[in-house]
Image (tube, rainbow, N blue to C red):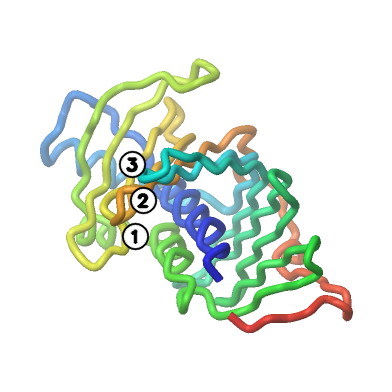
Amino acid sequence: MKKLVPLGLVLAMLLAAVAVSSPTDVKAQGAGFVSSLLNRMERNRQSLKSLRASVDMVKYNVQTKDEDKYKGVVLYVPAAGKNAYVRVDWSFPQKETLAVADGQFTLFRPRLNMAYKGKAGGKQSKTSTALEFMNMSRSQLAARYNLEYIGEETLWGGVATTHVKLVPKGGANFKWAEAWIDAGGMPVQTKVIERNDDSTTVRLTNMQRNAGISMDEFFLKLDSKVKIVPA
């Protein structure tokens, strides 16, 4: 089940990112900065009805200095509590689909003709983190994380962003997260530093905010020959 971790972690990255947006005064690093950031995050959370985007992920191993790279497409529709609807279709390095719906996840690996199914937030702790981030209100985010302004950065493609750091106040399964937010208030890149100092960086491009997404997309229709493995 170790190979499930990158897919669960990308959800944490993507959904934590969408919950955050940029402050008006990037020079303010005190209470005014935090308040502005949280207010914009709350407006973003309330107005976001769906998201479709291309996704690039790089998972870095600090001991071996190796990078694993992934490319695909992510779909998202919010829901009450931790029951957000999420689908990630990977096209590189191989085709895989991870879908989260009604508090359950399905990971389908067509090359193996196998699908893993289980409760989101159980053994998939990073998926649980993802759903908490995405549906977290202004007060919840402020209570659980310290937000720090890092600086202004231009990402590849010439995208100007504000770079912020989110440090857990306790109880998280990672050291900290970072987000790069563009001028329109949408995050275009996120990074999570794990407890062993490995990191995962996710970049969103070709974002379609509040695009029409059928709910059928989140319920995978598997052939009867697919082997189902409880997870």
- Residue 42 is tagged as 2
Give coordinates of residue 90: x percent, y percent. Answer: 69, 50
Q: Which residue is mark 1?
A: 137
For marks 2 and 3, the one nearer the N-term is 2
Give coordinates of residue 35: x percent, y percent. Answer: 21, 43
Q: Is residue 49 above or below residue 5?
A: above
Quarter of the picture containing the N terminus is bottom right
224 and 120: which one is in front? Answer: 224
* CA distance separating discs 1 and 3: 18 Å
What residue lies at 43% left-to-right and 64% top-to-bottom?
126
24 and 175: which one is in front? Answer: 175
Q: At label 3, which amino acid type do we have?
A: Glu
- Residue 178 is tagged as 3
What residue lies at 53% left-to-right and 56% top-to-bottom?
6
- Residue 52 is tagged as none
In the rendered picture of this protein, how many numbered marks are placed on residues? 3
Quarter of the picture containing the C terminus is bottom right
30 and 108: which one is in front? Answer: 108
Q: Give the left or right position of residue 23, taking residue 187 as reference.
A: left
* CA distance separating discs 2 and 3: 18 Å
